Amino acid sequence: MNTNRLATIATRQRQSRTRDFLFAAFVAIATLVSLSSVAIAADAAQIVSR
């Protein structure tokens, strides 16, 4: 019974790590999209002010 419980805990930790990795990947993608949007807006503002 104790071994089965440890296996269950190990499986949950693996699933949690996968979820954490996916979350970090989505945050990184959102950061890149945000930075590119700011860069595009800054370029557009410079063109308008000319």
Image (cartoon, helix red, strand yellow):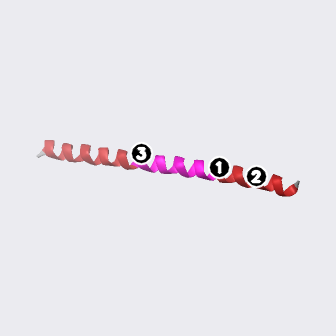
10 Å crowding of disc 3: few (<14), some (14-19), many (20+): few
Is residue 28 found inside the magenta-colored segment of the image?
A: yes
Residue that appears at 76% across and 51% down: 43
Q: Which residue is mark 1?
A: 36
Q: Which residue is mark 2?
A: 42
Q: Which residue is mark 3?
A: 21
Which residue is nearer to you in this view: 43 or 35? 43
Q: Is residue 31 left or right of residue 45?
A: left
**SS for dot 2:** helix
Q: Nearer the viewer, mark 2 or mark 3?
A: 2
Q: Number of numbered discs present? A: 3
Which residue is nearer to you in this view: 44 or 27? 44
- Up-down: is 3 above or below 46? above
Mark 2 and mark 3: Cα distance apart in space: 32 Å
The reply to whether dot 1 and dot 3 touch (C-beta < 8 Å) is no
Is residue 26 found inside the magenta-colored segment of the image?
A: yes
- For the residue marked with disc 2, what is the amino acid? Ala
Q: Earlier in the sequence, mark 1 or mark 3?
A: 3
- For the residue marked with disc 3, what is the amino acid? Phe
Q: x, y (%) of residue 6?
A: 20, 43
Q: Earlier in the sequence, mark 2 or mark 3?
A: 3
Q: x, y (%) of residue 28?
A: 53, 46
Which residue is nearer to you in this view: 26 or 46? 46
Tell me which segment is drawn in magenta. Answer: 20-34
Mark 1 and mark 2: Cα distance apart in space: 10 Å
- For the residue marked with disc 1, what is the amino acid? Ser
Per the rendering, the mark at residue 6 is none
